Image: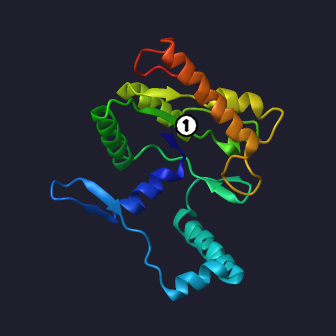
Amino acid sequence: MLLYSNDVRDDAVYYKKKKKDVTGNVVAISGEENNRLAELSRKSYLLRLIRKYYIKYVYWKEHRNQPEEKIAGDYIEESPMLSTLTKKLIHQTDSVLKLNGTQLVLSAVPSKYNLINHIPHDSTDFANSVKSFAQEKSYYYIDLVPAFETKSQTSLLFFPKDIHFNKIGHEVVAQQFQNYVYAFTHQECVNFGDSY
């Protein structure tokens, strides 16, 4: 499960839209209703631009008295700790996977802001908070930070304007996951809570 810092906020937003079965298990998250206005706004560059600046304004209004933002490209990078809800959802996912004979492996996207500004990752970074949680709860964890720090010295790993990996970033993630699978299948990483 690859986590990114906006997942904590998104968990809270989408969890409000949940549908449960009779036993209380979440079975679906309702999407937005399609209507003519929503359809038109997705196709209109002007309406999308207005929405972008409206979202920025709302964010600024809610966070104006907080410490300076980490702005990476055209994106404000959040660095929350894992919420109780997010931890609960991770535990539930783990339970379902175990019932099906599968092991949960956690990983987190390293801070783009820190990488492009050559700032060492520390315990306040989202990736490190996920790593600490994984170790505390004995989940396997694939630590992308060292590989990203090394590769970011010579290459860009994200698209300039947003939070998504570019081709090289995807290659680094794929290589780290491949290394983990190899180590796991060859019994080189057998302790729960181990990082790879």
Q: Indicate the position of residue 58 as horizontal and vertical percent values.
A: 55, 72
Q: Is residue 160 above or below residue 120?
A: below
User: In the orientation shown, which residue stands out farthest toward the left?
Assistant: 22
In terms of depth relative to the viewer, which is nearer, 101 or 160? Answer: 101
Nearest the eye: 128 or 3: 3
The amino acid type of the residue labelled 1 equals Ala
**Does residue 170 appear in this view?**
yes
Farthest residue in the right direction?
Answer: 154
- Asked whether, in this view, residue 168 is left or right of residue 123, the answer is right
Instruction: Name the residue at 74% across, 57% down.
Output: 161
Q: Position of residue 113 (x, y in %)?
A: 69, 45
Q: Position of residue 71 (x, y in %)?
A: 69, 54
Quadrant, the C terminus: top right
Residue 96 found in image quarter: top left
Which residue is at 60% across, 76% downward? 54
Q: Is residue 166 left or right of residue 55?
A: right
Q: Label 1: which residue?
A: 127
Note whether residue 196 is visible. Answer: no
Mark 1 Cα-neighbour bin, 10 Å: few <14, some 14–19, many ≥20: many
- The kind of secondary structure element at disc 1 is helix
In the displayed orientation, state which residue is furthest to the bottom.
36
Classify residue 127 by image quadrant. top right
Above or below — where is 180 with respect to 35?
above
Residue at horizontal 52 percent and vertical 66 percent from the top: 62
